[in-house]
Amino acid sequence: METEQIQNANQKTDIELVDEAKQGNRKSFSELVKRHQKNLLRLSLRFVKSLDLAEDIVQDSFIKAYEKLHSFECRASFKSWLFQIAVNTARNKLRETKRDTTDIDKVQVAVLAVAESNLVHSAIAAMIQEEVEKLPFKQKTALVLRVYEDMSFKEIADVMECPYDTAKANYRHALLKLKEVFESKNDFKEISFESQGFWLEINQFVEAEG
Amino acid sequence: MNPDPKHTHHKNAVIKSVLQRTGKVEIDLDDQFFDRLHDKIMAQVEETTMVPKPHPVKKLKNYLWSKPWRRTLLSREGFAVYLLVFGLTYQSAQSSIYFQWMKYQTREENILAQALKSPDLLHNLTDARPQSDFFVDVVNHSMNDFDYDQLKQVLWQSAESESETQ
């Protein structure tokens, strides 16, 4: 009987589960937590480097989502709404604490398996991540959602609670800033020049940007 | 800097690709971690009560106050800006009406001045417009702007041209 219920919950859409949760069905909300906790933790780790803090953000986000479930009107997807709460919670946490340490044991900024052994790739990865960290919060959010979460600008706008064009502008500004930094850094030029193969490999992954 | 948009577009895509490939966060955590996290969240959910559906009026109020620019519009400063904009718009509309009226006045006066100089024009005008309308206009303007001799001259000339046509 219980297995059947779990199977049913698995087949339901987020919106259906939200509707049931609104009527007091906690199991439906539990299914939503199961579905989205991993994504939310990954997103949180983009903003804070401490796993404990990221965990706190995930917990707080779900609790806030549960509390305000009635105000969710399905205009955006549940995921976007949840991400919106998580981004705001992360921003508040960052304001509260300046703690920003990486829990290296459990979180790894992974370059692809092939690249892991390659010091050049690691150096570039570290340099890039350093520059991403320096971006203003809104630009970083737009960049993270677009690049790492593969969200559309419409979804990004929903998460950031801003117009479509603003979301797009934030993303473009972030890219522009990174591009300027890379172009001005001689180290990066040298590294990239030496590793032509790396660039060729990247070019294979080049995709059209809307 | 290369101004070619295709080049820029390509570069953006390269940067995006670099970011994707170098910044992947792999969460090296087992299922137990997530089960524990889920249980913690659900334990807190058990103790949490859902906030009831907001009242439409309260909802509107919250919506209006939810963004800084909306707050500004509804604040005292915002009201002052409204007043200023309204005042300027009103002033500009009034000026526009006044200038139109002036333009109209000037045009009518020009016609009358020309008519005084040329009896032919006066004749044409009386032909083109109903005579009564023309004389009403003339009298109207004349009362304000013409002295007695000028008024007499206009009326006399138009009467003379009228008798000639008959």
Image (cartoon, coloured by chain):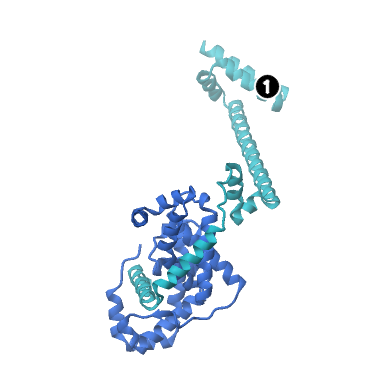
- Tell me residue B166's x, y (percent): 52, 10
Image quadrant holding the N terminus of chain B, namely: bottom left
Amino acid at pointer 1: Leu
- Tell me residue A169's x, y (percent): 46, 63
The shade of chain B is cyan
Label 1 crowd (10 A; few <14 / some 14-19 / many >=20):
some
- Tell me residue B85's x, y (percent): 65, 47
The residue nearer to you, when weighing B16 against A116, is A116
Camera sees residue B36: yes
Residue at horizontal 66%, vertical 50%?
Answer: B78
| Left or right: A188, with B79 as reference point | left
The residue nearer to you, when weighing B99 against A36, is A36
The residue nearer to you, when weighing A70 against A138, is A70
| Left or right: A93, with B76 as reference point | left
What residue would you read off at disc 1?
A: B151
**Total of numbered circles in the picture?**
1
The residue nearer to you, when weighing A66 against B127, is A66
Camera sees residue A143: no
- Tell me residue B88's x, y (percent): 66, 45
Question: Which chain is displayed in blue in the rendered image?
Answer: A
